[in-house]
């Protein structure tokens, strides 16, 4: 397996070596509490003061407050709390404060959720009002002009984490000034540090939260800038740390590490310049265009960070792209890491007005300012390899088979041989994909009903129209299909390999044997396939943890290691574990291989995939079919 190439820097970043060294020094030689008055505490306080001074210079904070926090979410909470407490107090004094909480439609969810949370808890009764963006992801200043006189607080971001779109902060400031708005203004600067010039004291910005781990500091450390004179209410009260503005013993290891990153920013030679990063982005974009003809970039480069690419490929889902990149050792994401587990189109791209295929199929590649030319060269080579892998047809090779195609919660099936394929009950959204698969494999997509068909006798005494395919016959019934080897014009129940559709169980028992594989149109008990005699209560399959796999394979020399990733993934990166090359059977073609595996129930079969989810399904299907030696590798390749 290829070593990782990390292209998800907008989610988090590796810690700078000098930051690691600084954190270790803070935990060893300078481990004291900075509130202590003895020498050990004073050494820790020096780290605290030095880092704060550096932060002031890097951020251009002037006389504003610079507070250390646990990260951007805490900073956002503190800013929102401070603004809304001020609104409540001004209202009590009879002032008009506005009735809207205006936030960019593409803001991180931490912003809108914080606004709703504190608005409810404080009882301010304000209305949350999204500020729309244009097709480039930039805020609609014309709309802001109408909203600004009513705004109690305005929340925007310096640059978007999903698209890299850079906000027109000067334009927003002009609108707020022109309207005479007294609204507090928070700017989420998480993606700005080290990528955009910062001179906060000379702006209209009241609050600016930062997060260290987005720029090579550890997780758990952040900064909140508060403009001099802006309202402030501490989120946490206690021992009086941070001048009574943010209580709790300081995270000195994190602060020391952040100080090293800030020192690198000041020194100016550690991180690449905007122009250098833009050149790297252009090379990555060229590789993506070579690999995926028709690719679209979801945000124009002239208005985005040079570290971020957000793309979609026509006809390819974001999940398929992620799996493909992951197989090649390229670590990318489908959007915000905080929302990646939720299978839904990107609300950021939806807000930009992009069509569903782009918002639902988007993938983000992001590099950090430490990336170098050798890294980009390697990434470009793997991206091009992914393009070649994606063009590897799952129907090619000349061997007959059965493939599952799924969409919108439904399953269809392709039965094929070296010349012809037939689509059985394809989901509506998969018809074009099936046609493309057939075309790419050089197969003729046959219409079963387009010609007069011979018939085959079934064991219940009935006859069914059929067509030959791959040395077998495909027989059509009123409520389904049978695939198996015919003998002298008969399709005996013992020769039926696969069953498709919703054939009545009573009749099915007469025309197919217990080990025949039923290929469902929707998941049944969580699976797309099952044998006729499948046991729902067969129990869970065997679970092998990565640290036990080597011993297991050595004890079971006959064990079959099966890679159930899809064809493109396997082409992008084959699997070898503990010297054992995996046999590749895509999960979409599991139904084709089940009969052979069931014929040897004593042979251990270990299924492997990227994360362990698909391999668990394969092992569960085999286990329910009566194979007691079906195993899944827990955590998949990610933990192997």
Image (tube, rainbow, N blue to C red):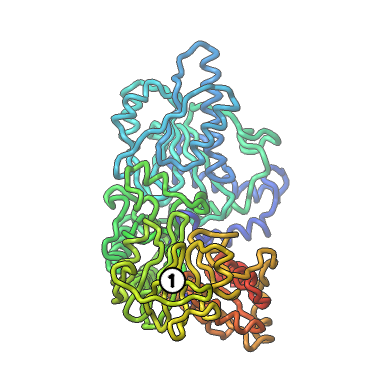
- Percent position of residue 251, x then y: 63, 48
Q: Which residue sits at x=36%, y=76%?
A: 454
- Percent position of residue 9, x then y: 45, 58
Q: Nearer the viewer, residue 345 or 160?
A: 345
- Percent position of residue 175, x then y: 32, 28
Q: Residue furthest front?
A: 461
Q: Which residue sits at x=46%, y=82%?
A: 485
Q: Residues within 10 Å of mark 1 (few under 14, many from 20)?
A: many
Write down the residue under mark 1.
403
Quarter of the image holding residue 549?
bottom right
Q: Residue furthest bottom?
A: 557
Secondary element at image label 1: strand
Q: Is residue 328 visible?
A: no
Please state, as top left, top right, bottom left or bottom right, where the C terminus lies in the image: bottom right
Q: Is residue 75 visible?
A: yes
Q: Count the labels in the image.
A: 1
Relative vertical location of residue 408 with respect to residue 619 in this rendering, above or below: above
Q: Is residue 408 left or right of residue 31?
A: left
Q: Nearer the viewer, residue 317 or 26?
A: 317
Quarter of the image holding residue 136?
top left
Relative vertical location of residue 188 with respect to residue 18 in this rendering, above or below: above
Q: Nearer the viewer, residue 488 or 231?
A: 488
- Percent position of residue 421, x then y: 35, 73
Relative vertical location of residue 426 with respect to residue 618 in this rendering, above or below: above
Q: Nearer the viewer, residue 305 or 288?
A: 288
């Amino acid at each position: 397996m290829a070593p990782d190439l990390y292209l998800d820097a907008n989610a988090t970043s590796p810690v700078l070596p000098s930051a690691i060294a600084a954190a270790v020094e803070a935990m060893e030689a300078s481990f004291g509490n900075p509130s202590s008055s003895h020498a050990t505490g004073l050494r820790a306080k020096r780290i605290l003061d030095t880092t704060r001074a550096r932060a002031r210079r890097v951020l251009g904070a002037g006389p504003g407050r610079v507070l250390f926090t646990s990260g951007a979410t805490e900073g956002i909470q503190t800013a929102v709390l401070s603004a809304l407490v001020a609104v409540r107090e001004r209202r009590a004094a009879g002032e008009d404060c506005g009735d809207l909480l205006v936030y960019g439609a593409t803001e991180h969810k931490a912003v809108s959720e914080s606004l709703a949370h504190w608005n409810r808890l404080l009882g301010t009764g304000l209305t949350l009002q999204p500020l729309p963006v244009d097709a480039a992801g930039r805020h609609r200043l014309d709309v802001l002009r109408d909203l600004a006189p009513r705004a109690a607080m305005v929340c925007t971001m310096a640059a978007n984490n999903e698209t890299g779109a850079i906000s027109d902060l000067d334009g927003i400031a002009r609108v707020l000034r022109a309207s005479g708005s007294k609204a507090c203004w928070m700017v989420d600067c998480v993606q700005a540090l080290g990528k955009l010039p910062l001179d906060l004291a000379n702006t209209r910005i009241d609050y600016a939260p930062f997060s260290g781990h987005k720029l090579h500091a550890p997780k758990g450390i952040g900064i909140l800038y508060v403009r001099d004179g802006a309202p402030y209410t501490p989120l946490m009260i206690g021992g009086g740390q941070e001048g009574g503005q943010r209580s709790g013993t300081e995270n000195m290891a994190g602060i020391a590490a952040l100080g090293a990153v800030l020192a690198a920013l000041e020194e100016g030679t550690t991180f690449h310049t905007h122009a250098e990063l833009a050149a790297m982005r252009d090379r990555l974009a060229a590789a993506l265009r070579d690999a995926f003809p028709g690719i679209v970039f979801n945000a124009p480069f002239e208005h985005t960070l040079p570290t971020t690419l957000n793309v979609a490929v026509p006809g390819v889902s974001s999940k398929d792209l992620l799996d493909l990149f992951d197989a090649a050792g390229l670590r990318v994401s489908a959007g915000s890491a905080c929302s990646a587990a939720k299978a839904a189109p990107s609300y950021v791209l939806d807000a930009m007005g992009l069509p569903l295929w782009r918002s639902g199929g988007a993938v983000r590649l992001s590099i950090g300012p430490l990336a170098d030319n050798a890294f980009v060269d390697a990434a470009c080579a793997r991206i091009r390899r992914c393009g070649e892998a994606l063009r590897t047809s799952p129907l090619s090779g000349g061997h007959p088979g059965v493939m599952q195609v799924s969409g919108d919660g439904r399953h269809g099936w392709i039965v094929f041989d070296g010349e012809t394929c037939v689509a059985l009950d394809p989901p509506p959204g998969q018809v074009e994909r099936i046609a493309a698969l057939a075309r790419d494999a050089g197969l003729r997509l046959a219409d079963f009903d387009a010609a007069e068909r011979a018939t085959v006798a079934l064991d219940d005494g009935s006859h069914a129209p059929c067509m030959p395919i791959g040395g077998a016959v495909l027989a059509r019934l009123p409520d389904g299909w049978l695939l198996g080897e015919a003998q002298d014009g008969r399709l005996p129940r013992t020769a039926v390999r696969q069953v498709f559709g919703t054939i009545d169980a009573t009749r099915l028992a007469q025309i197919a044997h217990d080990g025949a594989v039923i290929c469902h149109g929707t998941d049944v008990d969580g699976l797309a396939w099952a044998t006729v005699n499948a046991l729902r209560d067969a129990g869970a399959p065997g679970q092998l943890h990565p640290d036990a796999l080597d011993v297991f394979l050595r004890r079971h020399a006959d064990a079959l290691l099966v890679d159930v990733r899809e064809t493109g993934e396997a082409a992008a990166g084959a699997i070898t574990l503990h010297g054992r090359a995996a046999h590749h059977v895509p999960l979409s073609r599991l139904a084709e291989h089940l009969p052979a595996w069931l014929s040897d129930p004593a042979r251990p079969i270990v299924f492997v995939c990227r994360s362990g989810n698909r391999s668990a399904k394969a092992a569960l299907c085999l286990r329910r079919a009566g194979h007691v030696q079906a195993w899944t590798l827990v955590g998949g390749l990610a933990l192997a």
